[in-house]
Amino acid sequence: MRTSEMRIESGETDSILMAGHTFILAVTDADSKLENRSRESLMQERRQVIAQAIAEYRRVRAPHYLMREWRLRRRKRKGYSPSSW
């Protein structure tokens, strides 16, 4: 799923965040009242937080990142210090 594919569907009393046919999150009028904000601004904020979390998840699981982390752990176990690289 691309974060650009996430969409907000607004109803009378709630807004739903969807990714394709998958339900992600609902924000209701009651939620926005508790936050003392509009439902639209609350949903936009939550959408942004979720998109950032997805981007971070993908970043730390990218092959080059995983390989780099593996090499760092391996060097640490062998007693190398970053200054000796």
Image (tube, grey):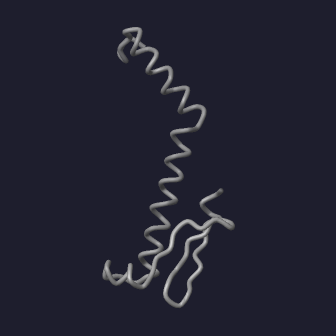
Quarter of the image for the N terminus: give it.
Answer: bottom right
Name, please, the residue furthest toward the bottom. 12
- Residue 76, x across and y down, in percent: 39, 16
Residue at image point 38% right, 83% down: 30
23 over 28 or under it: above or below: above
- Residue 73, x across and y down, in percent: 44, 20
Based on the displayed image, in which of its 4 quarters is residue 64 positioned?
A: top right
Q: Nearer the viewer, residue 68 or 73?
A: 73
- Residue 75, x across and y down, in percent: 43, 14
58 over 4 or under it: above or below: above
Name, please, the residue furthest toward the top. 78
Name, please, the residue furthest toward the right. 21
- Residue 60, x across and y down, in percent: 51, 39
Residue at image point 60% right, 33% down: 63
**In the image, 27: left or right of 81?**
right
Q: How many marks?
A: 0
Residue at image point 58% right, 37% down: 62
Quarter of the image for the C terminus: give it.
Answer: top left
Based on the displayed image, in which of its 4 quarters is residue 7 positioned?
A: bottom right
Residue at image point 31% right, 80% down: 34
Q: Nearer the viewer, residue 10 or 2?
A: 10
20 over 74 or under it: above or below: below
26 over 13 or under it: above or below: above
